Amino acid sequence: MSILDGVQKVLTLFGTGATDLSFSEVAARLALPRSTASRLLNQMHAYQLLDQDVATRRYRPGALLSAAVNPRVPTTPLDDACSAALDRLCEASGLTTYLCALSGADTVVLKRLNGAHPLQVLSQPGAQRPASYTAVGRALVSRLSDAEFIAAFGNDTRAPLPTTGRDTPRTVAAMRERVAQAHAARHAVAIDESMPGVGAVGAAVRDPATQTLRGLCLTFLSFQVDSSTVNALRSLVLGEVGALGRQLGDPYWTT
């Protein structure tokens, strides 16, 4: 097996749903000798195709892949802090969690963790959707200045937005109203909107040193939760993202 064959097979494991893998899992799933698997993973790590958790020693897709998939959204030191918060959200909730950024009027998935109870409908890293469709998108947009909002959505409040499902904002004016609500609440919730049967809670942080903006969210099956569970998930997201914001010195979270 050539090195490129091995790289393709390892990346396919991540492309079909794995979010992190141990050395033993890679060797077993690809039926590789342990020495071959070790050499392959070490080389992929050395060339930033894979990252390795220093505590668990498990591998995840690396920074170089993220930069290639999302050329308009370069990775930053903020992403490391966000990834740690995403890990905690995933572990505490057992749900699928996402790290996202804005690209114009769209959200871009930078990272996904499946959790113990992953949804069957998953967005892969690199996937883009209109920010108006999602909780994390509206949370991200709620952190924009007025000038940044106009640059992304235009100044015509009657202009239509892409719509899908139910209850997603249909005009720029409706989007402004929804993001104002998200800004005041410091988070956004979407339940049975762009995807029937799916709910999400999202919030956003901004690094005051670089103005880099990132959103974190968790997703769930809406028919499996009641209002008290949704409120608990709100508190979990607000707790983790708020703590991250205070750590960064984000004024939105420190006042």
Image (tube, rainbow, N blue to C red):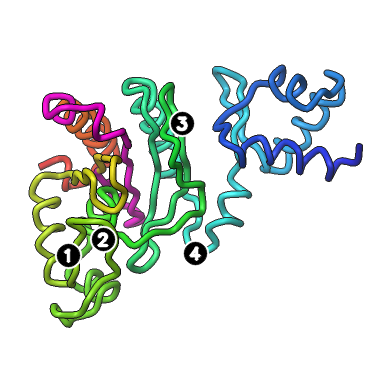
Q: Where is mark 3, residue-wise?
A: 114
Q: Are marks 2 and 1 in contact (CB under 8 Å)?
A: yes
Give the percent coordinates (x, y) of residue 87.
41, 28
Q: CA distance from mark 2 to mark 1?
A: 7 Å
Whichever of callouts 1 and 4 sits on the residue coming sooner in the sequence is 4
Look at the image and say whether residue 60 sits in the magenta stretch: no
Give the percent coordinates (x, y) of residue 130.
34, 62
Instruction: Please tell me whether mark 1 sits on a helix, a strand or a loop.
Output: helix
Which of the two discs, 2 and 4, sits closer to the camera? 2
Q: Where is mark 1, residue-wise?
A: 175
Give the percent coordinates (x, y) of residue 177.
9, 62
Question: Disc count in the image?
Answer: 4
Q: CA distance from mark 3 to mark 2?
A: 23 Å
How many residues crowd mark 3 within 10 Å: few (<14), some (14–19), many (20+)?
many
| Residue extent of the magenta highlight | 203-231
Who's the residue at 58% across and 28% down the image? 20
Along the line of sight, the residue nearer the viewer: 50 or 207: 50
For residue 251, say whether it is visible: yes
